Image (cartoon, coloured by chain):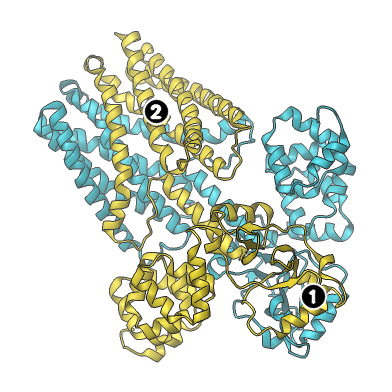
Chain colours: A cyan, B yellow
């Protein structure tokens, strides 16, 4: 790049996969990135745009000339273009759409009419279909005659005269069968129809649960409007997982390429919530000022009880949130799971109560203090198991994402219960 | 089940997908599960076994008669059988292998010879291949003549005379081309070869990064030994994500169907580590006993500083761990990321320092106390950003899974720094 040799740059980037080029662009600093794009403009590949993270994508599109942009997006499949433009500002969206041919433009606009994160957005409009009465031979002849087959397809979808999908045939079975065999005899029983309005998370779940490779998408009238393939579902699954992990940690949807100011803003709300819960816990402590003044050991030991409860709560919580996401935790087994988590909290609580009781005695020479911390530990770990399971389940029922909100509530419970149990018991038993 | 009507049970379960039957078995209690299996034995479907969680799988296999087991596993593909038996005890493994035909048994045993979690374990041995000089017509004729094609395949792999894969052709292009076209002209450039020894996590990453659908697997001599398809890669990706989430929360590899005692044992080590770090933090507090005795407000406020640091640290840590897993955080941008995290910590630290400073003044009427908590907040949140990024990077370099171990270290840093900064500043400025 430094030498400004356009040809050499192109020959360096040429053999790389678009995903790797995108990673490269994400990892270098702003200045060299701009220089690189300046130089490479003419050969810029549309697939690199698809692979870029959203916030960088906008910057890169801004830097491309309309011509370069047009040639970059023209070769993409309609679902990739949709994915590309759906998060862009109006102006940039217009620029990309203008670069498309009329046909493609229409396909993209139709897809954009479906709600965000729906199957309609995820699907590609290009389908490969055949009337249900065709034979293998007729289908192969039709495919050979077709100019513009999608890059990737795995099934031929059988449709009835009203465009309703009635089954599908894998290409493998099509290839392995004689020309005179009717398609109807080759139908797979894995066939599942996806409504275009379905949430993309549900779609990904269905692909994963039923090992689907591709599935037809239908509109409200049951007519075939597109097809979703497993690679799209895999991308959604990957995204949802990522979101869950980041939400559990209170990070929101940040990425490494975000500006400092954006990242700060994303993390602030969670920290603010935590500040409120921490102050709540402090208010509990403040009720026991006299006890703390008389026995300073209480101040030394009290964070241990809260911290152990917080960790145990996070454990229960994470298992519960994941089980809800994978639909393993449902109404029918919720009581069993709660019983189990409470039992686990009780057993671990007793174990650590014994350990901490002994530590308390040795450290401060007071058997009573040992008993106080041991009892508080048991109480708080049982509370942690209970809160860690019940809170996500309730949030789920209230249609709040449990990954996002559970953490704050559970920590509040374990902090408040922890400090209250420890200091309260201390007042009763020690003063 | 209660009425013991075998036929009715079979007709109820028949229309369900094996994955749903497995979910059903996972959700019901032990007693009805045993009754159900007792009754359903004769019709038991091998795919249900594949879908079950590991610990339940062993129980279910124990309950099946050898005959039922044999008929259940006979129809599975070799990779599913491998997946099924690899975690079983020797005795059960033997029982399943005995149930297989000689050919299948050999395929399974060959796969088991590859190391755990390698591409060799993941692949299916059944491949669809063609000599590189064939035409479309020859390939179709061969496929039509072949009795035993795999259930699912997406490419025909071209091999040279020494069995080395040289490219592949999608079935779509095969179907869309005339009989006389040579396969060589249809080769896809997405082609990637996977060594059998490669870690399955790497395989899943490659599928996700390069949007692969299937990829040939080769042995040390570069000869084709199997093929991995996207559904297997998707399952691995799903598993690795799950593992990461659970490890970040210190839960290990538990599942909802585990016994209480197993779950307790899984969570205990993490809680034990946390106890040690919590005691470390308490030791820091103990150094300031005199200060705490004189100003009880310190005891009330100190958990706030530690808790905010802990949360900010978890945020940085989670982003770092995920970025390492997705290969977005590498040697080339590590300094930039560290600078960014420290900057975010600084900005958020200053914001919350102001808030807490004001709270401190209002609550306790002491401007100096407000300054102490504000300064401690800034220091601890910068430390959190630094530790949250540096610790996972170092662990990764030491080949320790950062998802597993970072949490404990980061919390130790934020607790120790938080308490030390707050109480230390209090001694200097207030006493």
Residue B417 visible somewhere in the drawing: yes
Q: Nearer the viewer, residue A286 or B311?
A: B311
Q: Quadrant of residue A223?
A: bottom right
Q: Nearer the viewer, residue A13 or A344?
A: A13
Residue at image coords 68%, 38%: A26
Residue ID for mark 2: B413
Q: Residues within 10 Å of mark 1 (few under 14, many from 20)?
A: many
The quarter in which the N terminus of chain A is drawn is: top right
Q: Residues within 10 Å of mark 2 (few under 14, many from 20)?
A: many
Q: Quadrant of residue B294?
A: top left
Residue at image coords 16%, 32%: A360
Q: Nearer the viewer, residue B185 or B294?
A: B185
Please state the horizontal and vertical placement of residue B293, each as a whole percent of the image.
21, 17
Q: Nearer the viewer, residue A374 or B389?
A: B389
Report the Cα–Cα distance between label 2 and label 1: 61 Å
Residue ID for mark 1: B175
Please state the horizontal and vertical placement of residue A200, each as a whole percent of the image.
61, 59
């Amino acid at each position: 790049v430094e030498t400004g040799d356009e040809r050499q740059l192109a020959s360096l980037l040429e053999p790389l996969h678009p995903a790797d080029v995108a990673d490269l662009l994400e990892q270098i600093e702003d200045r060299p990135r701009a220089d690189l794009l300046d130089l490479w403009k003419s050969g810029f590949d549309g697939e690199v745009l698809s692979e870029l993270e959203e916030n960088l994508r906008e910057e890169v599109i801004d830097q491309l000339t309309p011509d370069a942009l047009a040639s970059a997006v023209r070769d993409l499949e309609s679902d990739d273009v949709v994915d590309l433009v759906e998060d862009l500002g109006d102006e940039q969206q217009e620029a990309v759409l203008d670069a498309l041919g009329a046909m493609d433009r229409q396909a993209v606009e139709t897809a954009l009419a479906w709600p965000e994160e729906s199957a309609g957005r995820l699907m590609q409009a290009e389908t490969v279909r055949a009337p249900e009465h065709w034979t293998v031979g007729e289908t192969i002849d039709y495919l050979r005659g077709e100019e513009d087959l999608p890059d990737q397809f795995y099934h031929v979808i059988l449709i009835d005269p009203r465009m309703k999908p009635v089954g599908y045939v894998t290409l493998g079975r099509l290839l392995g069968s004689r020309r005179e065999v009717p398609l109807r005899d080759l139908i797979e029983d894995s066939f599942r129809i996806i409504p275009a309005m379905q949430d993309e998370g549900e779609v990904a779940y269905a692909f994963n649960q039923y090992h689907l490779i591709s599935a037809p998408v239908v509109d409200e009238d049951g007519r075939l409007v597109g097809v979703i393939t497993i690679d799209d579902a895999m991308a959604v699954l990957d995204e949802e997982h990522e979101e869950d992990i980041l939400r559990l940690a209170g990070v929101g949807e940040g990425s490494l390429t975000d500006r400092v100011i954006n990242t700060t803003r994303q993390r602030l709300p969670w920290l603010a919530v935590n500040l409120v819960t921490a102050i709540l816990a402090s208010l509990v402590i403040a009720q026991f000022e006299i006890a703390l003044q008389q026995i300073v050991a209480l101040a030394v030991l009290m964070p241990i009880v809260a911290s152990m409860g917080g960790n145990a709560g996070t454990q229960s919580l994470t298992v519960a949130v994941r089980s809800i996401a994978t639909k393993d935790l449902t109404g029918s087994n919720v009581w069993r799971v709660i019983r189990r988590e409470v039992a686990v909290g009780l057993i671990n609580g007793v174990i650590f109560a014994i350990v901490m009781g002994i530590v308390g005695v040795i450290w401060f020479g007071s058997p009573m203090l040992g008993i106080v911390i041991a009892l508080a530990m048991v109480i708080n770990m049982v509370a942690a198991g209970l809160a860690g399971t019940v809170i996500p389940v309730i949030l789920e029922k209230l249609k709040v994402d449990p990954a996002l909100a559970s953490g704050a509530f559970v920590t509040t419970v374990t902090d408040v219960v922890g400090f209250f149990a420890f200091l309260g018991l201390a007042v009763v038993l020690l003063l």
